[in-house]
Amino acid sequence: MSEEEPIGCARPTGGPVGQHEAEEETRQSEESKKEKSSMIQVGKPAPDFTAPAYHKGKFTSVKLSDYLGKWVVLCFYPGDFTFV
Amino acid sequence: MSVDSVFVHKMWNDNEISKMVEGGVPFPMLSDGGGRVGTTYGIYNVDAGVENRGRFIIDPDGVIQAYEVLTPPVGRNVAETIRQIQAYQLVREGKGSEATPAGWKPGKPTLKPGPDLVGKVWEVWNPSMESDD
């Protein structure tokens, strides 16, 4: 599920999975951009993504769809070392 | 998940969080530099360049069952997130035969939706039943 990643000086990046075409389309018009931002709905599939991660002393990569079959809480927050 | 790099995640975990929680953060701390994932989920704050406090409950089929989004200055209530997961797990096990009323907690009565329940919720659930007293 999460193998350790080789770490260089470049900052590892991830992103949405399988949405490159959709992203191209959103660049074409503001209207389709709005449609994309309203994609999130309860009862609808969570958009898949990969992201670099720090987990128990290792740098790994996490893909949301690897967690199918489990309950997942996906939490976003403004920043490390913040106060809340 | 935040826009911080995995290197900052490591420093935060090792130097601060591990002093608040034994063993440090038990789950993966994800990095979303540039906010592309946050943008997909509709919680990236473009003006501040950070993620808002978005929290998504995703079921074993990969379906979003619930979400909550707060602006940065107010923190979340973890107990409420856990309560919602417990409720969704119960509903899933019952394959939709049971529903949980407002304020439901594990051990409290559930509702059995159907023609017989119409107009009769008051007989099986009262808001005062939310409390543990």
Image (cartoon, coloured by chain):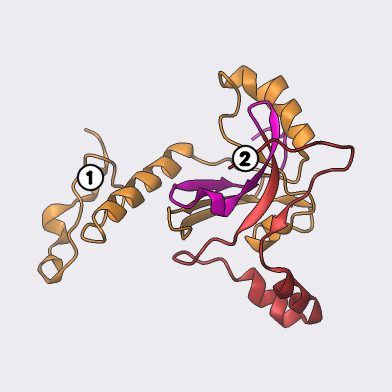
Chain colours: A red, B orange
Q: Look at the image and tell me whether residue A50 can be seen.
A: yes
Q: Amino acid at mark 2?
A: Ser
Nearest the camera: A74 or A13? A13
> On what subunit does the disc labeled 2 rest?
A
Query: Residue A22 appears at what percent x and percent y?
Result: 70, 74
Magenta region includes residue A56 = yes
Determine the image quadrant of residue B132: top left
Q: Is residue B69 visible?
A: no
In terms of secondary structure, where does tag 2 sit?
loop
Q: Which residue lies under the disc numbered 2?
A: A2
Position of B51 with respect to B100 (left or right) is right
- Identify the residue shown where x is 55% and y is 50%: A66
Q: Quadrant of residue B42?
A: bottom right
Q: Which residues are magenta?
A: A55-84
Q: Quadrant of residue B37?
A: bottom right
Q: Compared with residue A9, is residue A36 higher up or lower down, i.e. above or below?
A: below
Horizontally, is A14 left or right of B115 in the view? right
Residue B34 vertical position relative to residue A32 in the rendered view, above or below:
above
Q: Amino acid at mark 1?
A: Ser
Please give the name of the residue rendered at 22% of the width and 45% of the height, measured from the top-left corner. B128
State the CA–CA distance, disc 2 to disc 1: 46 Å
- Residue B121 lies within the magenta run: no
Q: Secondary structure at mark 1?
A: helix
Considering only vertical position in the picture, is B10 above or below B4? above
Quarter of the picture containing the C terminus of chain B is top left
Q: Position of residue A52 (x, y in %)?
A: 71, 44
Residue B128's mark?
Answer: 1
Mark 1 neighbour density, 10 Å: few (under 14) some (14–19) many (20 or more): few
Determine the residue positioned at 72% across, 40% down.
A79
